[in-house]
Amino acid sequence: MAITALMPVYPRCGVRPVRGEGCYLYGEDGRKFLDFASGIAVNALGHGHPKLVGAIASQAATLMHVSNLYGSPQGEALARRLVENTFADTVFFTNSGAEAVECAIKTARRYHFANGHPERHELITFDMAFHGRTIGAISATNQDKLRNGFEPLLPGFAYAPFDDLDAALALIGPRTAGFLVEPIQGEGGVRPASETFLKGLRAACDEHGLLLVLDEVQCGYGRTGRFFAHELYGVTPDIMAAAKGIGGGFPLGACLATEEAAKGMIAGTHGSTYGGNPLAMAAGEAVLDVILEPGFLEHVGDMGRRLRSSLEQMIPNYDGLFDHVRGHGLMLGLKLKSDCRAFVAHVRDHHDLLLVAAGENVVRVLPPLIVDESHIAECVEKLSEAARVYVPATDD
């Protein structure tokens, strides 16, 4: 048999984790890695957090899954807490970020259908966006690397340059339902939107009766030092997709919406076999308990400033390799002047530091939100050691 038992859709590296503790991962060979990738912003509480582990173990021994044909006291409780702490009036729980985005797209389309305008089904999205790997999610991005070989894709999307308000507004037409945008693009290169851009989209939605749909799968849930990134901008969405950190490593996502935006989502319009299962809800409750503890988000903000300052102080020593730092909180991008993927592999293989490559030759630095100053100092030391000996590949 030529194909591997595990479908070979990932170019997997040689790191094979079998255990995690706090900000560290341990391979099956015993090797210890400083994890500043966090499962691509998923392990918000690091590895083996006692509150999260305890909640999952306790719930697993009680009830793991029941059909959504029945009442969900667990889902109702977590949904109420999210409603109390966000803009939203209602929540649909999913198993992943892509599913949360799918629900958001459906909610936006159904809103206009319910208002008697089914022709308003088109969402304006943005270059370099990443919304997931489902057919709907890849249709919402114009990245060839995500779309090639999967055509025909779904109609109903138009594409504008990210952070270009005039270009986005120029696409508004009779079919427009709203905008779908990441406040901070993750896979696209840790690209924060400008305040002018997001506020302009919000104003356009208010003016034209459109919906502002935010994808906060990566930038939400405390990662920027705010509960959700849109709080940095003073902008309120109508619909929002969340995932990654929401379960701390347990598969969980959510689509949040205002009552008005969700007016079309009535019985029978959407569903999920596993979405909102009691085990996921227990994980979600535990993560939320920690994130909403007094001082936790302030800690994230403090550590984000410390990490950014440390990276910026390092750059002049290796200015032939590094360019600048961008992002917010503990969602930072280190822009390189050469191939970022080769550098990520170098620091992983030779300096035991885990980072994540992104677009525009940006290295994503995404530590667990529980990171402390000693971890930051260790990260920067490893980066400096790596930069000191690293030789970028040339085209010769």
Image (cartoon, grey):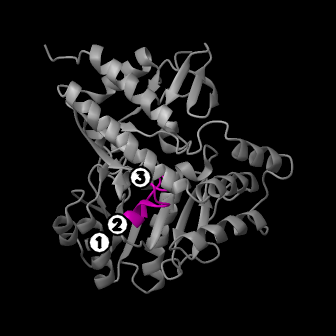
**In this orientation, does residue 67 appear?**
yes
Q: Which mark is residue 199?
A: 1
What segment carries the magenta color? 214-233
Main SS, magenta residues: loop
Using a 10 Å C-alpha cutoff, classify the residue at mark 3 as few (fewer than 14 neighbours), some (14 to 19) or many (20 or more). many
The percent position of residue 302, horizontal first and vertical second, equals 44, 49
- Residue located at (24% from left, 32% from top): 315
Q: Are marks 2 and 3 in contact (CB under 8 Å)?
A: no
CA gap, disc 3 and disc 1: 21 Å
The disc labelled 3 sits on which kind of residue?
A: His
List the residue tagged with mark 3: 131
Callout 1 secondary element? helix
**Where 185 falls versus 166 (above or below)?**
above
- Residue located at (37% from left, 49% from top): 130
Q: Are marks 3 and 1 in contact (CB under 8 Å)?
A: no
Q: Which mark is residue 233?
A: 2
Upstream in sequence: badge 3 or badge 1:
3
| Most distant residue in the bottom direction | 116
Q: Are marks 2 and 1 in contact (CB under 8 Å)?
A: yes
The disc labelled 1 sits on which kind of residue?
A: Lys
The answer to whether residue 225 is magenta is yes
Callout 2 secondary element? loop
